[in-house]
Amino acid sequence: MSDAIEGLDRDPEILPAGQGRAESSLRRLTVKGQPFFVLKQRGSFPDMAYDHGRLLAQEIQDGAFPEIVSTIARGVNLENETLRHVASALYRCYSDRILKDSSDEFRKAVDGLAEGYMAGLDDPAFSLLEVRDALIAIEVGNIIDGLSRIFQIPGVRAIRAPAILALVLPSLADPDTKNYLEEAKHEPEKQHDIGAALAAMSGPNNRIDFGCTGFAVPGALTRDGRLLHGRNLDADLFHWNKAPVLSLLDETGENAGWHKYAAFGTAGLIYPGGISGLNDAGISVSLHQLSTTQFESGFLFGHGDICPFVQQRVLREAASVDEAVDLVKDSKHFAAWTILVSDAKTGQVCRIEMNGERVRVMKHEDEAVPQTNHFLHHDMAERLFDEDDNHFSPTFGKWLETHARYDSVSEALKADAGQGRIDLTWAMNWLASSRDGALEKLRQGMPTPPDPMTAERAYGRVPRKVYSQLTSIVLADPARRAGHDAVWMTTGDRQPSPHSSYLGWQVDWAAFDLTPVAPEPLQRISHYADGGRKNWEESLVRYLWARLAVSRPRDSQGDLLRRRPTAAEKQEGLARAIHLVGSAIELAAMDRIVEVPYHYMRARLNHAAGDYTSAEKDWRLLRAIWAWQNDAPAIAADWPVDVPRAMPLIHPYEAALVALLSAVTEDLRHGGTGWDGRSARLEEAKNLLTSIQEETFGKDEPAHFDFDNWLDLLAAVSEEGGQAVELPEANFVTAE
């Protein structure tokens, strides 16, 4: 099937003499009509970054960068002029501080890529400052996320706001805004308003976010004896696959103890090894993002580095898990991350968990290890749900989601590791899994567990995410025999990435070369289509498009907005999203599948658009499913199918939100609170929220702060009516 890869027979592109700084060659391939790039480079990191920017300048300009730059600009472009200046100054302050306090090597590489991009185009669309901001946006977003949480906690806000705002003041030129910020250092009301601005900047539609599910399985536990390290990159970068890049990198020229490495990225990604990759010593890595209030944005002594570059250094410099741990411990860190490291030679797998204040390590010997987006070390685990935790989940839905993904993959690994079942196909299938770990626990706890499909979902608490952009799988030989390492990477010919085609490459470290895996370098999951879910699989794309209609607003010319959308643009985006979710519902129904997240999000979208009658129909369907699940009196509803293939389950947390939010919709639909069943529905929501809180965290024990947010909303709805409240922004990723 290598004939499906067009361009292999063409000479690679090389920069003319005098234009490049490293030894770089670029293959421009096409796979089933999808562009795919193979970049081989030798030299120093800054020089390779320059060549990357120059060789892929047009792809950088057309790919992920417009999305990153517009998201930054839209995030700070608040309606209130003073707060807009404050938001811009906050972002400028922390972006500048992070870059200034990064290592000389990293700063030179940032400058190199920016200069290469500028030199590669006659009329570059982005300034040097915009390129620099884009290259470190992921870590700046982490800081903004942490600041937002700090400003949500009144006591912590009062203590930390003066120092935080003092850092920002030098970034302000406007005298009125400077005066406002000086006053805000000591005025709680202004601090509260700045907290609202930070919340808007860090909302689900206004930041670049990573999710990520991964696992590492030592060779002794896999089918073919090679270590298998797989991961989904879940990232709010929907133009990633305009230019997917597989890099083979060699910085060993003046560093004999370093290693060659293969890494996965996109045009403009300065740290491909900071996503996932494999080195010539059999070390593989994947990076997983978290949120924390215990961040650093600068260092009195020495320097730090953003974690993706630290992970790239692991690939470049480590030949063992211990060397990887030492490197990470010797580095200073800005925010919260987990690096999952595995060693093909020894079968060791290690979680390295860090934030701005500490690093903790969990080592595993000959054990299959899953990883999602929460800390697991005893010292680091989220348990107090206040500023003293080493990380935080922004919502309970996110907390439940990362634990559900972890549980799903963990159970699969326990069942199949060492049984001769874990191989490339197994990894591809599980990275595209529909299994909801939270629903699976409910299903198995029933007296007569129903069909396993009842615990499956399109999106939400499953390994496949609505923003999965890249899936990579590494196969590394424990004996380190030549020609036995392979790397597989999705091409992005369809989304989400786990449903895309995979392109496999054999790595020849000695020859410093990549060749397509024989005999079948192209693979794709098939069990959904083979199992009668072809239309449902297409519905995944429509739901994804619906999210983009809301989270990536565009102007009348189709360009991404760098400002907040107008009321008319919001309505237009909502209308498109409603249509697309409706299309997803219809496609799923063609395979007799009822998808709870589709109906939930359509209800939320119709409510936001002011169509309360349509919203009520979806709320009613969800309430009918919950009634059936609990043997309660039937609720008449409009079903998309006459007989579902499997009756879907609803989690009690979802049922609580459905009860609460449907009551808000009914208040607005009826123009008041005098409708039958209102008190009972709100009481149901309260009872469910309270019971979930106690069952999850224990009675009288610290619980996730999001429960207070929902219970406060419920109290306001009860006392003042749905007309008096503003609902939180709907979350397509977790489906709340």
Image: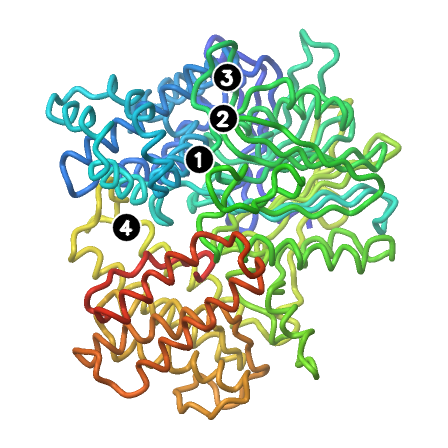
**Residue identified by numbered label 1:** 142
Q: How far apart are marks 2 and 1 (CA)?
A: 9 Å
Q: What residue type is labelled 2?
A: Phe
**Residue identified by numbered label 2:** 334
Looking at the image, do the residues carrying marks 1 and 3 touch, with CB atoms under 8 Å apart?
Answer: no
Q: Where is residue 297 drawn, in percent x and y?
A: 43, 23
In front: 262, or 330? 330
Say what secondary structure mark 1 lies in. Answer: helix
Q: Is residue 2 visible?
A: no
Q: Where is residue 185 drawn, in percent x and y?
A: 24, 27
Q: Which of marks 2 and 4 is in front?
A: 2
Q: Which of marks 1 and 3 is in front?
A: 1
Q: Quadrant of the C terminus?
A: bottom left
Say what secondary structure mark 4 lies in. Answer: loop
Q: Which of marks 2 and 3 is in front?
A: 2
Instruction: Give the total number of marks visible in the rendering.
Output: 4
Q: Distance between the residues labelled 4 and 3?
A: 33 Å
Looking at the image, do the residues carrying marks 2 and 3 touch, with CB atoms under 8 Å apart?
Answer: no
Vertically, is 586 above or below 190? below
In front: 120, or 1? 120
Residue 553 image label: 4
Q: Where is residue 365 drawn, in percent x and y?
A: 83, 39
How would you rate the neighbour count of disc 2 (Cα within 10 Å): few for under 14, some for 14-19, many for 20 or more? many
Q: What residue type is labelled 3?
A: Phe
Q: What residue type is labelled 1?
A: Asn
Q: Which colour scheme is used?
A: rainbow
Say what secondary structure mark 3 lies in. Answer: helix
